[in-house]
Amino acid sequence: MTHPLSVTLADADATLVLGRELGRAAQAGQVIALVGELGAGKTTLTRGLVRGLGYEGEVTSPTFSLVQEYLGGSLEVFHFDFYRVEDEHELLDLGWDDYLERGGLVIVEWPSLYPDLLPRNTRWLKLSHEGEGRLVVDLESPFKG
């Protein structure tokens, strides 16, 4: 990570704009872990990321399906939600390792539930409430902040 991110966003639209910028800069094989409480903007940021890669379809939270695939943009995107995962074997059975090897962009919500499954070079972003808006910062490790 060469340019650590720390930005305050006024609203959901600003979160989408940041996501689009991050999406345009995304690289094949990148993993982005999104940390934050319910309602912090993780899915909104993901929606922007996917749009920044040129995907035009609906972007929703994978809370119940565990993973959503967005194909048709400049990179394939695999959006995971670890919130309802019972144990790491459930993710491995789902093909976690295969998704990592496909060379797309992997986005993970609630990554701190299974941090050992994420590659060492994962980019960790923390979203938090900041007044009426949101604060988004890069984390140095999954165990900070």
Image (spheres, grey):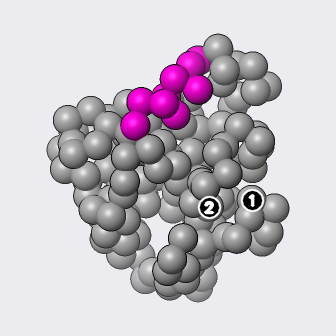
The residue at the point 58 percent across, 38 percent down is 81
The residue at the point 67 percent across, 70 percent down is 139
CB under 8 Å between callouts 1 and 2? yes
Query: Camera-side residue: 124 or 11?
Result: 124
The residue at the point 42 percent across, 30 percent down is 102
**Residue 69 drawn above or below residue 13:** above
Does 96 lie within the magenta span? Answer: yes
Residue matched to label 2:
124
- Which residue is most to the top? 93
Quadrant in the picture for residue 58: top left
The residue at the point 66 percent across, 37 percent down is 82
**Residue 25 drawn above or below residue 138:** above
**Residue type pointed to by label 1:** Pro
Please tell me whether the stretch drawn in magenta is mainly helix, strand or loop.
Answer: helix
Element under label 1? loop
Residue 112 placement (x, y as % from top left): 75, 50
Can see residue 57? yes
Query: Camera-side residue: 15 or 19?
Result: 19
The image quadrant where one finds the N terminus is bottom right
The image quadrant where one finds the C terminus is bottom right
Q: Which residues are magenta?
A: 94-103
- Relative placement, left or right, of 91 versus 51 is right
Query: Badge 2 local density, few (<14 within 10 Å), some, or many (20+)?
Result: many
Question: Distance from label 1 to label 2 (Cα)?
Answer: 7 Å
Element under label 2? strand
Residue matched to label 1:
142
**Residue 47 drawn above or below residue 86:** below
- Relative placement, left or right, of 1 versus 56 is right
